[in-house]
Amino acid sequence: MSTLFIVATPIGNLQDFSPRAAEVLKSVDYIACEDTRTSGHLLQHFGIDKPTFAFHQHNEHRKVAHLLNILDANQDVALISDAGMPGISDPGFLAVRAAQNGGHTVSVIPGPDAATTALVASGLPCDRYVFEGFLPHKKGRQKRLGELSEEERTIIIYESPNRLLKLLGELEEHFEENRLAAVARELTKKFEEILRGTISELRTEFEQRDSIKGEIVVVVSGKGYSE
């Protein structure tokens, strides 16, 4: 049977792309991309010239059948996201499940991801943590924040730059005001920034800025943690 390769891509710095990942992408018959235009820059940089097709959150259910047809024809497919590991807050889970159910091999090519990079850089406990990804924008958001306020493990949350202040305000409301946290921005890129302090201190810092840019990861200490 053929193989579905899940390939991690750089979260910012192209030098983090592994030789093995490049070799796999050069060997497969097709590459499924979260955004073919974004992935096109990566593929061109590494001299990879393979047929691509879009595979993202808006067409994932529909494209799984197309992906399976390729695998059933004894051709290999690699799945990549715009940045990081496919399946982690990005499309991928349905493809892996379908490929396995279809009797195909699934091989994961590991690489960088923003969650664990931010976790280690935060200086907060890394031995036990919970990954939340993006919180619900509306329904269930406040309930989930209340549940997380009781969590004793370190918490990792993804957030967009234009919603960071709202999130920090909500965390300040639901969590203890002296709860330690870190905000990681533009990880592995030229203007990488990791700020650490209480939730209140971080909110005050970002409120004073004219603008907030870049991919954001917020790491929050678990309940009861103190230095």
Image: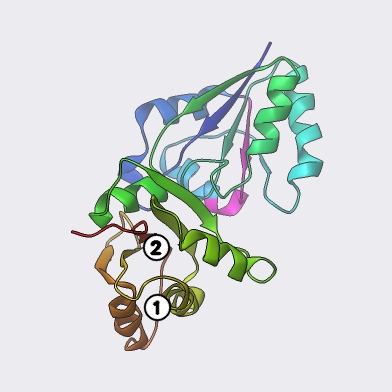
Point out the image quarter for the N terminus: top right
Q: Residue drawn 51% across and 53% down?
A: 132
Q: Residue 147: x percent and y percent?
A: 54, 60
In the image, 125 versus 184, the foreground residue is 125
Residue extent of the magenta highlight: 29-38
| Magenta residue check for 93 | no
Which SS class for mark 1? loop
Amino acid, disc 1: Ile
* Disc on res. 218: 2
| Magenta residue check for 33 | yes
In the image, 89 versus 153, the foreground residue is 153
Q: Which residue lies under the disc numbered 1?
A: 212
Q: Residue 96: x percent and y percent?
A: 65, 30
Amino acid, disc 2: Val
- 162 sits to left or right of 202: right
Can you name the residue that lies furthest to the top here? 1
